[in-house]
Image (cartoon, rainbow, N blue to C red):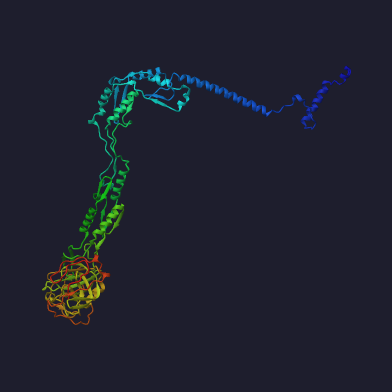
Amino acid sequence: MDETKKDCFTETPAETAKKERGRSRRRLTGSKEAVPVTAAKQPKEPEPGKNRARFLAAVLTVLILAVGAGIGFYSVKAGTYSSAFLPNTEINGMDVSGLTVAEVKAEIEKGIAGYELLITERTGAGETIKKEEIGLHSEFDDTLETILAAQEPAKWILSLWNPVSYEIETMIVCDESMLAERIDTLACMDEAVMIEPENAVISEYRSEIKGYEILPAVQGTELVREQVHRVISDAVLKLMTEVDLDAEGCYAKPAVTEDDAQLNALAAELNTYTGAVVNHTFGDSKVVLDGDEIHTWLSVSGNQVTLDEAKAAAYVKQLAQTHDTAYKPKALSTSYGKTVTITKGNYGWRINQAKETAAVLAIVKAGEQKTREPEYLQKAASHGTNDYGNTYVEINLTAQHLFFYKDGKLIVESDFVSGNESRGWSTPAGAYPLTYKQRNATLKGEGYETPVSWWMPFNGGIGLHDASWRGSFGGTIYKTNGSHGCINLPPQVAKTIFENISAGDPVLCYHLEGTGSKTTSKPNGQGSSASSAAATTAAPATTVPTTAPAATVAPETPLSPIETVPAGTAPAETSPQAPAATTPAATQPAGPGYGPGFGYEPATEAPVGPGYQ
């Protein structure tokens, strides 16, 4: 094409600008018209395989450099340890890691120069040993060099986890005799000032805590000489500047400390016993058994606690002596207005000492705290000012007259006939519990049997019963024609008492001067009753109604009396055996002895003698 034609196709600047504006406008308006882009300006996507290769090459380069550097460092350190001791190397207690032989010797010489050892004692006091006093100096041979030559420098890194220690006889030396002498002259080694250790022990009983406590061991200041010499010698040879004798275990130790298991178990057992409390009640009063008494029953031998059961029994025995009322005098304000003292008889409280001792020991061994009444062989009506209470039979043997009170109320009173005085069978005075009562009993003797309707024994074989064979009661019949000891009663009186009395109720027999009479009374209430009159005209006791009649039972048809039995001809009868259900052995205490003719000893079981009439 010629130049003219080329010029024809040449765009003016204005046209070019216009075209550019058009392209821009199309781009901005989102035209779908393709915009031509030259291949040179088009961006290229990266190639993944080539980039990964470049990364791995970089990492490998770093590793090679690091390994090279490490190898170089390791080689340098190995070269260092060819003339110095490996890490974690100790010689005679001295850390020589990284030091040369010359440096080790220099350190030793430096340590010896002006050396002194401070010895600290348990008391806080301190003493010193100087090098001049023990001939301390250095001595070197070729041992250090031998140890260094035996090392493997190329394996230095292994020594970081494998420490080694050497003990050599040369290098630091002292005069052993001078050192031993200096140690023995230390003030703390003077036996005169040493305090021996004391074992932990259990204290004496302490009333304020009702028990025992463990007293801690006393450590003392007694030194074990061999240990002191060894510890100080080792410290000197290692050029230590201070040693603590207590920390190094140089003091003698107590054999038993306050943490000892056996000692604590022993104290716990003792405190179990002394922690027990037994409150014995006696009515409104109370007796307390606690550690203050119990500790006297205890003894310790080795690791064994012994509870002395004999002392427990003695304690219960003392309780019985203080609080038992059986066989002890009793004051009775009689229905005659006078007070008598009854000195004999077994009525009253009686502790069963064997059972109560066993109960107390069980409580003490368990360390319990209990309130209890004692175990009793026999009980009484009251723990008050009198033990017989206000239900009892009052028998005036002088007046031959009795009164039966129930709950303080007079139920019946009557004349009676007691034991034959002329034959030595007098009914004994005394306070007795009713043993039992039996309906329709038979009194037996040699070739003779006499039935009675109301049988109430109270003193061995002596009892209250109806005497249907008698036509009169009271007066002086008993002196020559009395019974073998029983209280013979009009049948209706015996019946009334029988129906109102219970086993264990007290029967109080006494003599009262000035109340006797010769006048008798009939069983149906007829005839003279001077004895009763005496009772009703005298000042009554507090429990007796002031208007109490001489007899409060209804008259009955008289039975055929047996009034003329000559003294000494009465058959030797025996009382019936008590029913098993109503006569427990524990409630049948032995009564006092009786006059001649009874033929048996008092027993705790239902009697089988004597004769009656």
Q: In the rendered image of this protein, does residue 433 appear above or below residue 257?
A: below
Q: What residue do we see at 44% from left, 24% from top?
A: 87
On screen, residue 117 versus residue 467, left or right, reads right
Q: Residue at x 45, y 19 (%)?
A: 82
Regarding residue 58, the answer to whether it shows in the image is: yes
- Which residue reaches farthest left? 422
Which residue is rendered at x = 27% and y = 54% of the image?
361
Q: Quadrant of the N terminus?
A: top right
**Quadrant position of residue 373:** bottom left
Q: Is residue 195 left or right of residue 4?
A: left
Seen from the viewer's position, the closer of residues 194 and 89 is 89
Determine whether 458 is above or below 200 in the image: below
Across and down, in percent, residue 482 comes to 14, 75
Number of callouts:
0
- Expressed as whole percent of the image width and height from the top left, the position of residue 25 reads 79, 29
Seen in the picture, residue 248 relative to 174 is either above or below; the reply is below
* Residue 285 visible from this viewpoint: no
- Which quadrant holds residue 176? top left
Rendered residue at 21%/60% (across/down)? 324
**In the displayed structure, does residue 606 sit left or right of residue 238?**
left
